[in-house]
Amino acid sequence: MSKGPFACRVTPSRSGQPQDHGDFSHQAEITMVYPLTATEKLYQIQIRDPEARHNFSFKPGQFVMLEVPGIGEAPFSISSAPSRHGDIELCIRAAGTMTTFLSRLERGVMVGISGPFGTSFPVEDMLGDDILLLAGGLGVVPLRAPIMSVLENRSRYGRVDIMYGARCPSELLFGYQHAMWRQFDIDLQVIVDKGEEGWPGPVGLITDLLRRRLEEGDRHRLATQTNAIVCGPPVMFKFVCAMLLEAGLPMEKIFVSLERRMHCGRGKCCRCNIGSTYTCLDGPVFNYWSVLNLQEAI
């Protein structure tokens, strides 16, 4: 598996060749809609054709194009375990025309799925190492797939820390799974910018959690046996990655997802380009060495 600057490219989509599983749409059905917060819902989507469902596979960090007939299509990070194949989960916030339409749909609606597309988090290269997974806000959505992948192979990794920050308790995602994550010998810490009545956890920034973890860690082990996966708003990338570098983590062992920059998902609208690099075609997962060479990436 490649450890180059663009992590784990599956198929170069700008070559003119179709990506894995083709640039076509699988007919799929929304089999479950689960409200997570006032604005986010989790959609379970099943590819209808049994053979296509069996053959569908993806890597943590990749995305699919979701098409709602008559409404449009958009890219969404896959937020489920890679072992689930053609039964995938997408966490979607109602924010625009298509996503607001989606928020009114119920189970049984037919949609189209294309993909998977994009680069991925190289979790297989991290076997035997410690992993730091840091998410801010909606950043936990693309982070959930590598979390589930690590859980399924927990004995093959060293120490695993998950640090998750949100603006307030009511905006926390996947709270119903937090206890289960901890049962897998994972140190999960959750923090909010602003507490609410009854909130028992810490109030502050995710950097507060990271600072304590780095201070207690073996600096040699951090520098030689630790990988970091970071997903969140750009301001979080800036401070979190700076702290990781200062602690001695090599840039090639810090991975970020720039999926927030994507729009059309096919490299046509040019809204996610950074110079000659397109987030949807060359990413969305990059290691930090690559990000530093992309002006205005974060």
Image (cartoon, grey):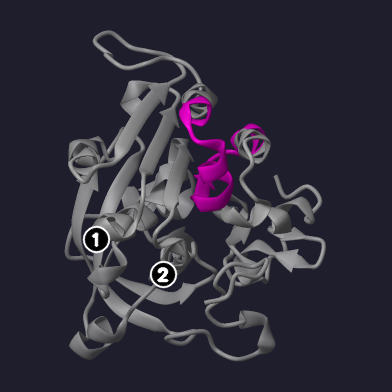
Check the image and report above or below for 256 versus 219.
below
Q: Locate residue 12, reporting x and y percent.
A: 62, 82
Q: Locate residue 112, reporting x and y percent.
A: 36, 74
Q: Which mark is residue 59?
A: 2
- Dot 1 amino acid type: Glu
Name the residue nearer the viewer: 113 or 190: 190
Q: Locate residue 85, reporting x and y percent.
A: 27, 74
Instruction: Write down the residue under mark 1.
Output: 152
Q: Magenta residues, as a range?
A: 213-239
On the image, which quarter does residue 24 sit in?
bottom left
Residue visible at 49% across and 47% down in the picture: 96
Q: Locate residue 63, reporting x and y percent.
A: 46, 65
Check the image and report above or below for 193 versus 65.
above
- Dot 2 amino acid type: Lys
Residue visible at 42% across and 67% down in the picture: 124
Name the residue nearer the viewer: 3 or 292: 3
Name the residue nearer the viewer: 274 or 253: 253
Check the image and report above or below for 87 versus 193.
below
Local packing at callout 2 (Cα closer than 10 Å; few below 14, some 14-19, many 20+) is: many
